[in-house]
């Protein structure tokens, strides 16, 4: 290669490198450093070692937020079931799939804030649509937004509504990769749909299932905006880890404790993904 | 038996179509209702007197046009940065050999793995140090190029046959021309998919703009609308009109570029 080329390569890479360095790599380092200090806007920063991490263990709001975030993980199997079923139906019907997929994309591309606003009014306890239906069919109202754990269900419904179209696409792509010959041979042998599902389809799309578990699980651990819009008035004990992070950093201005919580979120998502990948490797 | 199965599957499918679309039907219906009708119980799906005045009123009640413009500036800038720097870096990573290439690629992968939540406070501190708090630049710069874009473009460039590159180079093409004139046009489908994904996610971005933007004239749509739900608690018809106007670009783009959106999700999913 010419040396002129070599120089221009470095010139071309420089902007990207600067951006990655300043807005990704250095922040990662700072996250760990900040968590070892006591930093807020009111007094000079000081080194406190692992105090922020030790504080986690005696913080009941942290435990509650952690538990809530883990509860939201149960969205993962539900959303997997819904999107896999719909992908199978689309594949089986084999007609107009482009139109159907486009319709299912619409909730996916709706900004969370707007999705939250719409559902907040559907869940509205006094004059919302759902309580109107509840009143007419069951003669009682549900506290969709103000009571715990009802509001957990509401946030889950919003999350599933906005998410299933996304995972449907991933499953649909996974289903296309199943070997046609095996499937058709099974049909010729008279294998019914459920037999093919459990003996041919599911074993072949296991990596896709793992992928959907990892993606939707990490998203569930990191829920924030959904709660911020849907249940802003709910007490802290109804909120998630990332919400608690936001609260500590930008309402209590305890940036170092907030950063510590960020590391916990990172460790949780990494271990959840790792666990899923290990599980699938073990089965092979 | 076949007919029965088909009816059963179709009804499940249509149930989910209804679930997916119903909130929008309701949003549209509410945005067309008058002030009195909004509190009617039971709520009505078809407004008795249709009115478009909510769409005018929301424009007057809050600096809605300013929010819209801000969201556009931010989204277009972030899309531009990711397409240009993402493709340039992806091209070099895929097609050239240079010193520290593996280290750079490793950094790219690390930046994909790091969740935004973990670096939220450091990013805030950096934006603070750069004196960019309460400015659009403060939310554009941290998102200007991300590892995901570089990775996706790298995959696209990897799939171009080597012969094309060799032919261009033996014609005396220089490096930038090889990238800009020969290779980049061949990655057009990926560029469209990536641009669409980045636009949609930037348009809907909330947490970081929420902590960086302070004054009303700098709000993006999402931040502005979230504050609006606080101030206009009982005025859902205005909020509905505002929400409808702000969800419009994402939905329109997705309908027209549905194929590219799917391609983007698929390529992004298998990263």
Image (cartoon, coloured by chain):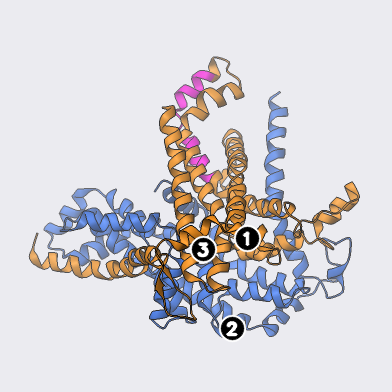
Q: Residue at x 33, y 54 (%)?
A: B109
Rendered location of residue B66, percent (x, y): 57, 82
Rendered location of residue A112, percent (x, y): 60, 62
Chain that bears disc 3: B
CB under 8 Å between callouts 3 and 2? no
- Residue B252 located left or right of residue A14: right
Chain that bears disc 2: B
Regarding residue A106, the answer to whether it shows in the image is: no
Looking at this view, name the residue that lies furthest to the left. A2
Nearer the observer, disc 1 or disc 3?
1
Q: Please rate how many residues cluster around mark 2, counting C-alpha atoms within 10 Å: few if below 14, some from 14 to 19, many from 20.
A: some
- Residue B208 located left or right of residue A227: left
Q: Chain in orange? A: A
The disc placed on residue B216 is 2
- Residue B118 located left or right of residue B108: right
* Quarter-of-image position of residue B242: bottom right
The answer to whether residue B91 is magenta is no
Q: Are marks 1 and 3 on the same chain?
A: no
Chain that bears disc 1: A
Kind of element beneath mark 1: helix
Q: Residue at x 54, y 16 (%)?
A: A188
Main SS of the magenta segment?
helix
What's the magenta region?
Answer: A169-186
CB under 8 Å between callouts 1 and 2? no
- Quadrant into which the C terminus of chain A falls: top left
* Disc 3: which residue: B200
CB under 8 Å between callouts 1 and 3? no
Q: Nearer the viewer, residue A241 or B268?
A: A241
* Disc 1: which residue: A226
């Amino acid at each position: 290669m010419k040396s002129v080329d070599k120089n221009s390569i470095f010139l071309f890479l420089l902007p990207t490198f600067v951006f990655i360095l300043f807005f990704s790599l250095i922040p990662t380092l700072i996250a760990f450093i900040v968590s070892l200090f006591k930093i807020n806007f009111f007094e000079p920063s000081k080194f406190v070692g692992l105090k922020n991490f030790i504080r986690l263990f005696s913080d009941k709001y942290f435990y509650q937020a952690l538990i809530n975030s883990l509860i939201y993980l149960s969205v993962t199997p539900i959303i997997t079931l819904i999107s896999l079923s719909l992908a199978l139906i689309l594949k089986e019907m084999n007609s107009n799939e482009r139109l159907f997929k486009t319709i299912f994309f619409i909730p996916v591309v709706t900004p969370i804030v707007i999705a939250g606003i719409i559902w907040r009014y559907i869940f509205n306890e006094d004059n919302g649509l759902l309580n109107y239906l509840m009143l007419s069919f069951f003669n009682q109202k549900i506290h969709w937004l103000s009571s715990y754990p009802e509001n957990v269900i509401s946030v889950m419904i919003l999350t599933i509504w906005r998410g299933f179209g996304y995972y449907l696409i991933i499953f649909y792509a996974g289903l296309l990769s199943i070997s046609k010959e095996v499937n058709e041979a099974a049909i010729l042998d008279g294998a019914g749909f459920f037999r093919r599902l459990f003996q041919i389809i599911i074993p072949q799309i296991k990596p896709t299932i793992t992928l959907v578990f990892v993606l939707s699980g990490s998203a569930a651990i990191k829920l924030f905006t959904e709660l911020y819009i849907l249940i802003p008035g709910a007490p802290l004990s109804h909120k998630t880890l990332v919400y608690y992070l936001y609260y500590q950093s930008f309402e209590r201005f305890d940036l170092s404790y907030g950063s510590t919580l960020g590391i916990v979120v990172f460790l949780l998502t990494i271990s959840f993904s790792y666990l899923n990948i290990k599980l699938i490797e073990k089965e092979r | 038996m076949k007919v029965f199965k088909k009816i059963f599957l179709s009804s499940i499918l249509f149930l989910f179509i209804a679930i997916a679309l119903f909130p929008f039907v309701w949003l549209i219906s509410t945005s067309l209702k008058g002030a009195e009708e909004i509190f009617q119980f039971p709520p009505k799906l078809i407004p008795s007197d249709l009115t478009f005045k909510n769409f005018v009123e929301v424009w007057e009640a809050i600096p809605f046009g300013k929010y819209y413009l801000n969201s556009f500036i931010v989204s277009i800038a972030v899309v531009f940065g990711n397409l240009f720097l993402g493709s340039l870096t992806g091209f070099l990573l895929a097609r050239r050999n240079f010193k520290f290439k593996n280290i750079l690629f490793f950094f790219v992968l690390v930046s994909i793995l790091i969740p935004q939540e973990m670096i939220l406070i450091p990013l805030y501190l950096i934006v603070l140090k750069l004196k960019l708090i309460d400015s659009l630049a403060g939310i554009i710069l941290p998102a200007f190029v991300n590892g995901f874009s570089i990775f996706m473009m790298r995959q696209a460039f990897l799939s171009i046959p080597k012969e094309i590159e060799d032919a261009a180079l033996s014609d005396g093409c220089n490096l930038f021309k090889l990238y800009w004139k020969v290779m980049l046009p061949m990655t057009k489908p990926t560029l469209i998919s990536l641009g669409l994904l980045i636009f949609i996610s930037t348009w809907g971005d909330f947490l970081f703009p929420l902590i960086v933007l302070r004054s009303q004239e700098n709000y993006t749509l999402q931040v502005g609308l979230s504050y609006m739900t606080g101030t206009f608690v009982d005025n859902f018809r205005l909020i509905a009109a505002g929400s409808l106007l702000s969800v419009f670009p994402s939905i329109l783009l997705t309908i027209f570029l549905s194929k590219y959106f799917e391609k983007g999700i698929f390529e992004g999913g298998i990263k």
